[in-house]
């Protein structure tokens, strides 16, 4: 069964450093997403991406964050200058986008656990 | 503000028990509803979509009450492998590629 993959599985960085989290969505999917989950808290939406542009973003997704689809397979999340509060699990997800009323299943990758020291 | 509220639990039940989880959502624009399952330190995985007429998938039954903005999940004949956190999820608005809004989850522990 096709899967969303993410690298690295774990990342430790110093406050103020830039990090890039990588995702390979399912190959025939058209919509891509990033979510984060701070330890012990709920999963929160960051951004969605379609046709090489951001289609929706949350208030969490400020100027420190950016997304890119640099080639036909990868989808990246960059955090320019990490803060302690960016420590979380970051999940990538993808969907075909073909179903009515947003009913399509979002398939999640295994996540990247980011720790900012 | 768009919120999904769930009883965090934990629900501790013996094998074979029936357990019910409830959820309320505040976003009246939500049109798609889901239950996801999340194992410890893993990604959320879709358990089932929730349809207006209610739907069943084996031991799992989901119900939706749009008027009350209330969603439920019933698990019959609980198995040890059902131990997980169950996430109530709704879509942000009614279009393809919409964001999902998650509840904090209800933790279920099934013991032998």
Image (cartoon, coloured by chain):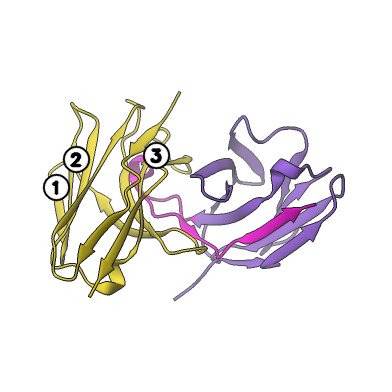
Q: Is residue B52 left or right of residue B33?
A: left
Q: Position of residue B36 (x, y in %)?
A: 36, 55
Chain under numbered label 2: B
Mark 1 / mark 2, whichever is N-terminal:
1
Give the CA separation, mark 3 to mark 1.
Answer: 17 Å
Tell me whether marks 3 and 2 sit on the same chain. yes
* Viewport quadrant of the N terminus of chain B: top left
Chain under numbered label 1: B
**Eye-nearest disc, 3 or 2:** 2
According to the image, label 3 marks what residue? B91
Give the CA separation, mark 1 to mark 2.
Answer: 6 Å
Q: Is residue B2 left or right of residue B21?
A: right
Q: Position of residue A84 (x, y in %)?
A: 75, 44
Chain under numbered label 3: B
According to the image, label 2 marks what residue? B64
Mark 3 / mark 1, whichever is N-terminal:
1
Which residue is found at the position 80% from the left and 53% from the top?
A19
Q: Are the residues tagged 3 and 2 within 8 Å (C-beta)?
A: no
Q: Position of residue B66 (x, y in %)?
A: 20, 31
Instruction: Let me know if residue A114 is in the magenta part.
Output: yes
- The residues colored magenta run A95-117
Q: Is residue A68 left or right of residue B84?
A: right
Q: Are the residues tagged 1 and 2 within 8 Å (C-beta)?
A: yes
Mark 3 / mark 2, whichever is N-terminal:
2
Tell me whether marks 1 and 2 sit on the same chain. yes
Question: Which chain is drawn using purple?
Answer: A
Which residue is found at the position 44% from the left and 58% from the top?
B44
**Label 1 SS:** loop
* Label disc, if present, on residue B54 of the rendered structure: 1
Which residue is found at the position 44% from the left and 54% from the top?
A106
Question: Which chain is drawn using yellow?
Answer: B
């Amino acid at each position: 069964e096709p899967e969303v993959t993410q690298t690295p599985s774990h990342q430790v960085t110093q406050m103020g450093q830039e990090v890039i989290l990588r995702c390979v969505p399912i190959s025939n999917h058209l919509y891509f997403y990033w979510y984060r989950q701070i330890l012990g808290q709920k999963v929160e939406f960051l951004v969605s991406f379609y046709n090489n542009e951001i289609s929706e973003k949350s208030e969490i997704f400020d100027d420190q964050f950016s997304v890119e689809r640099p080639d036909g397979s990868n989808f990246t999340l960059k955090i320019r200058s990490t803060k302690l509060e960016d420590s979380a699990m970051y999940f990538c997800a993808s969907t075909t986008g073909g179903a009515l009323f947003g009913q399509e299943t979002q398939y999640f990758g295994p996540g990247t656990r980011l720790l900012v020291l | 503000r768009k919120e999904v509220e769930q009883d965090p639990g934990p629900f501790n039940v013996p094998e074979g028990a029936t357990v019910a989880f409830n959820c309320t959502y505040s976003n009246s624009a939500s049109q798609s509803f889901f239950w996801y399952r999340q194992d410890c330190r893993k990604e959320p995985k879709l358990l089932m979509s929730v349809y207006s007429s209610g739907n069943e998938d084996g031991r799992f039954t989901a119900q939706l009450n749009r008027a009350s903005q209330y969603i439920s999940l019933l698990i019959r004949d609980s198995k040890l492998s059902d131990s997980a956190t169950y996430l109530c999820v709704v879509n942000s608005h009614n279009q393809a590629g919409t964001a999902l809004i998650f509840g904090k989850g209800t933790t279920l522990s099934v013991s032998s």
